[in-house]
Image (tube, grey):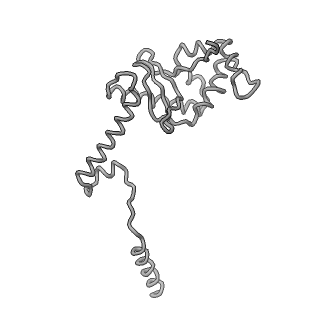
């Protein structure tokens, strides 16, 4: 028994002295709330947060003059809609999905002509979009499901793109338009070639 205790104690001491100290990643909240953090370190973290927040705000509003509080409110609203849409897509709940789509988009994508043109561009040859439900199943859900949106970009005060940043490039997953004070998804229209 003494031998086992001695081995355990020896091993513990070995580990204690053989491990070099490393910096442990601590969340910003933990760092700011810790009593062991200097005022200078605390100020630096807060400044970094402000800088990153300002950088995102600048990227998002470079073409439109938007107050910071409006930006924060709109971003939160849009991220909430996207979160709800993720649940809708997971359940393939078409009826619920329609509640998030702006009326002009519903009208546009209910057109047999637009659906036929879009069918020609589908990656699966011969697959047809016969109605808006097919658009939901074969176009909307596969192109957005499981995608992460990091930021928003204002086009105007009433139009926003929801994007994922990849190496200084924006990948647009959603376009939003404000309809009667509510952010709704504006589905992309077909690009007309030859013009």
Image point 58% across, 12% down: which residue?
107
Q: Nearer the viewer, residue 141 or 113?
A: 113
Q: Nearer the viewer, residue 168 or 74?
A: 168
Q: Position of residue 174 (x, y in %)?
A: 52, 26
Image point 37% across, 35% down: which residue?
55
Could you tell me how many numbered marks the image carries?
0
* Residue found farthest to the right: 126
Q: Position of residue 103 (x, y in %)?
A: 53, 14
124 relative to 82 in the view: left or right: right
Res 121 → quadrant? top right
129 relative to 158 in the view: left or right: right
Q: Is residue 188 above or below residue 56?
A: above
Q: Is residue 28 above or below residue 104?
A: below
* Residue found farthest to the left: 39
Res 145 → quadrant? top right
Q: Is residue 13 above or below residue 124?
A: below
Image point 39% across, 59% down: which residue?
24
Q: Nearer the viewer, residue 61 or 149?
A: 61
Q: Position of residue 119 (x, y in %)?
A: 70, 20
Assign the C terminus to one quadrant of the image. top right
Q: Position of residue 168 (x, y in %)?
A: 47, 36
* Residue found farthest to the bottom: 2
Q: Nearer the viewer, residue 134 or 108?
A: 108
């Amino acid at each position: 028994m003494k031998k086992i205790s001695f081995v355990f104690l020896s091993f513990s001491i070995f580990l204690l002295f053989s491990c070099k100290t490393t910096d442990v990643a601590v969340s910003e909240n933990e760092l700011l709330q810790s009593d062991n953090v200097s005022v200078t370190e605390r100020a630096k973290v807060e400044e970094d947060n402000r800088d990153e927040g300002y950088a995102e705000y600048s990227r998002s509003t470079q073409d439109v003059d938007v107050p910071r509080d409006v930006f924060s409110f709109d971003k939160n609203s849009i991220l909430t809609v996207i979160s709800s849409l993720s649940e809708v897509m997971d359940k393939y709940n078409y009826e619920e999905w329609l509640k998030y789509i702006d009326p002009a988009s519903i009208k546009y994508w209910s057109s047999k002509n637009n659906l036929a043109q879009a069918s020609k561009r589908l990656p699966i040859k011969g697959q047809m979009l016969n109605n808006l439900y097919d658009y939901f199943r074969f176009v909307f859900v596969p192109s957005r499901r499981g995608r992460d949106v990091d930021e928003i970009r204002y086009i105007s005060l009433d139009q926003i793109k929801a994007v994922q940043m990849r190496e200084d490039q924006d990948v647009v997953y959603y376009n939003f338009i404000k309809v009667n004070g509510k952010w709704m998804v504006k589905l992309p229209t077909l690009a007309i070639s030859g013009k």
